[in-house]
Amino acid sequence: MVTLVTNDDGIDAPGLHALARVAVAAGHDVVVAAPAAQASGASAGITAQHDDGRIPFVPREVPGLEGVPCFAVEAAPALIVLLAAHGAFGEEPDLVLSGVNHGANVGRAVLHSGTVGAALTAGVAGTTALATSLDLPTPEHEPVADWDAAAAVAARVLPALAGLAPGTVLNLNVPAGGAPDVRLVEAPLADFGVVQTTVTEELEGDLRLAVRVPEEHDPEDDAARLATGVATLTALSSVGTLPLPLDAAAL
């Protein structure tokens, strides 16, 4: 499979490199194209870092990925996926792998994630995608992140991806300290996520946002299950339509 590996943490992120290595080991024809700079929170935005329409990208040498085409792109991850779908980095990908993200992406807050946004963008284009994230505590308590272990969990999912319907998007979260053989469970999205934003100050002409951790979760949702030390896998729906809940003709 022609496989694009991208992320929102940038081309130098160790999680990106670990995910690319397991795809190579699985026999995929891999190309790495990732933001030249941090793009967390980019969602599915198709923004570039230049206002004149140019989207610069440069080849990069990545240790451990010798012989794999790697590009640093001055664009958000969703735009990188769109560019790849138009052949910007070689053949159009059959699969998009996004991650391994620094921090969990759980709950409906995945809407804001650049890692998940890249996967959802692939899904809209009819390409199967897997977003992978490693749950890490706050920096002051952060252990040495085991990116290889997190990528190894993603590698367990890879063989099944080829048999999925085109456009399927899966979201994988791996607990901090999780071994490659950590238990993997299906879990629905939490109502919001690990953290929520709240306005803490309202001053004239300015606001300040802070994050807070919700006190309760449904014990079966992805945030709660991840907190118990298991890895979670969730199939995400992308953009679509639902029956209109009113009579449009009466409006």
Image (cartoon, rainbow, N blue to C red):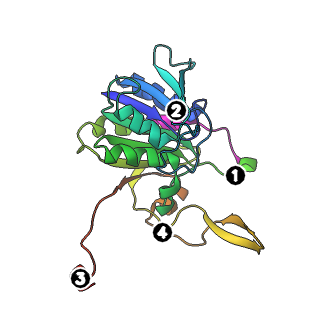
The stretch of residues the image draws in magenta is 142-152
On residue 14, the disc is: none
The quadrant the N terminus occupies is top left
The residue where tag 3 is placed is: 247
242 to the left or right of 157: left
The residue where tag 4 is placed is: 191
Which residue is painted at 69% across and 52% down in the image? 138
- What is the C-alpha distance between the residues marked 4 and 1? 22 Å
Q: Are marks 4 and 2 in contact (CB under 8 Å)?
A: no
- Of the image marks 1 and 3, the number of the one nearer the N terminus: 1
Which residue is painted at 52% across and 51% down in the image? 113
- Of the image marks 3 and 2, the number of the one nearer the N terminus: 2
Residue most extreme to the bottom = 250
Q: Nearer the viewer, residue 91 or 16?
A: 91
Residue 114 at x, y = what percent?
51, 47
The residue where tag 1 is placed is: 138
- Of the image marks 4 and 1, the number of the one nearer the N terminus: 1
Amino acid under disc 3:
Asp
Pair 4/1: label in front: 4
Pair 3/2: label in front: 2
Give the class, few, some or many, for how many residues have Cα within 10 Å of label 2's Cα (few <14, many ≥20).
few
Pair 1/2: label in front: 2
Residue 83 at x, y = what percent?
41, 34
